[in-house]
Image: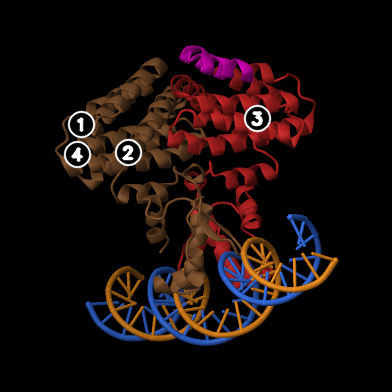
Chain colours: A red, B brown, C orange, D blue
Amino acid sequence: MAHHLGRAIVSGAIQPGERLTGEVANAEALDVSRSAYREAVQVLAAKGLVESRTKAGTRVLPRSRWNLLDPDILAWAFSGEPDLGFIRDLFELRAIVEPAAARLAATRRTKSDIAAMRAALALMRRHTLATDAGRAADREFHDALLESTHNSALITLSASIGAAVNWTTQFKQRTKALPRDPVPDHARVCDAIVAGDADAAEAAMRALVDLAFDDTRYSMDGLDGR
Amino acid sequence: MAHHLGRAIVSGAIQPGERLTGEVANAEALDVSRSAYREAVQVLAAKGLVESRTKAGTRVLPRSRWNLLDPDILAWAFSGEPDLGFIRDLFELRAIVEPAAARLAATRRTKSDIAAMRAALALMRRHTLATDAGRAADREFHDALLESTHNSALITLSASIGAAVNWTTQFKQRTKALPRDPVPDHARVCDAIVAGDADAAEAAMRALVDLAFDDTRYSMDGLDGR
DNA sequence: CTTATCAATTTTGTCCGACTAATCACCGGC
DNA sequence: GCCGGTGATTAGTCGGACAAAATTGATAAG
């Protein structure tokens, strides 16, 4: 329900500023009760997609008010035709956050953090990124890395970044075979963090993100990245 | 409604993993209808605070699943006793994101971006941070800066970071007089961005965030920051 | 002709009561 | 001791009715 409406908005089918038809009309058009429809709208309002004022109806807010890093919204955004510009923005964010996070992780990781990262890495090695299990392991690796910064704000971002990583890798798979084995890059990051070498961890992570972006761009050839 | 429940959860009065009492009981305890209560819970679920499964009741999710960067959640977090550890985490995030954003802004800013930043700066100069108008101008400055990166993911973060900046400055004011004039720091960042000097912009922004963190820590003396 | 005030209508917000569906716990049979 | 069924508990859905708010239109005064 909320997914249906959310996709319609994120995909641009409804356009910011536009008014949704009245609750009663829209509810029976989608063949649900008004309560269910209202709850769906509440969810969208909580994510900053729409705003409801009495009499004025519920309007779609401008994109700048959307909580684009919300995992659900990311899922909706990638469920249709992904926007290359948005993917570039996400990688730019990763390129800012993840190297800095790797630097912090290198100085703060605990034994259990290291264990979690190594476990995820082992799973990545076993399954490839072509499988769901492999992609889950990839996400788990990045999760474990951000977790070992012991910074709750960064950990929250991990949910968004993890989702973004997942969708982009899935998209890569969809178009053509993966051109490069990503495990060694991840292993280098992991080793540097285990060794406690902040500079090396940051550099390795920067390299990883750049390569991942290159791969994604490559899988969308014909369009240049800028 | 949602604010009431949200504050109770974020403040830790309800603790992750705990079960909320049944809908009917809780709804009449808060003296609202079940529909209204349900819609509030939906909002919290959309923000990742709780999860509802039939029969099992609605449980408070672990903090790691919360969308801590949601503006509402930030507001709830700062409506009670602010957690020093959390504030440190937020400043750490700012210290990662904003300098990098300033670097990008220095190369991408347009004329209208510059105008927006200068206008915000002028407002900051006129009113001080002691007034609501001044704090609004401060937020507008950071908003305009992140806007001029022309990166939608970073712009989304601006809402979160802006809220955090707002709450922390307000908290600073609450305890004692502001020890330093923040305008020159902001002006340096602005000038560097206008000049298109990426390195200078990054450095100036890094200095600004560090000083702001120092001020905030100073206003909470007795507790050391680490 | 402009402007201000007031009323009517539209749209969201709230409430109530009943029913549905899913899941878990208990109980009996195997 | 294990397995399957049955009941109870809880969120999820539904429909209808009412309340509140705000915009829009009409109307009257300047």
Which mark's residue is nearer the viewer, 2 or 3? 3
Q: Residue at x 73, y 19 (%)?
A: A180
Residue occupied by mark 1: B218
Are the numbered discs 2 and 3 placed on the same chain, yes or no? no
* Left or right: residue B74 compared with residue B184: right
Assign a secondary structure to mark 3: helix
Which mark's residue is nearer the viewer, 2 or 1? 1
Q: Position of residue B161 (x, y in %)?
A: 39, 38
The answer to which of marks 2 and 1 sits earlier in the sequence is 2
Assign a secondary structure to mark 1: helix
Q: Chain of mark 2?
A: B
Residue occupied by mark 3: A138
Residue at the left extreme of this rendering: B177
The CA distance from mark 2 to mark 3 is 33 Å
Q: Position of residue B91 (x, y in %)?
A: 35, 32
The CA distance from mark 4 to mark 2 is 15 Å
Q: What kind of residue is marked 4?
A: Thr
The CA distance from mark 4 to mark 1 is 19 Å
Q: Chain of mark 3?
A: A
Are the numbered discs 4 and 1 placed on the same chain, yes or no? yes
Q: What kind of residue is marked 1?
A: Tyr
Q: What kind of residue is marked 2?
A: Val
Are the numbered discs 2 and 1 placed on the same chain, yes or no? yes
* Left or right: residue A52 compared with residue B99: right
* Crowd around label 4: few <14 · some 14–19 · many ≥20 (10 Å): some
Q: How many marks?
A: 4
A34 lies above or below B162: below
* Crowd around label 1: few <14 · some 14–19 · many ≥20 (10 Å): some
Q: Position of residue A113 (x, y in %)?
A: 52, 27
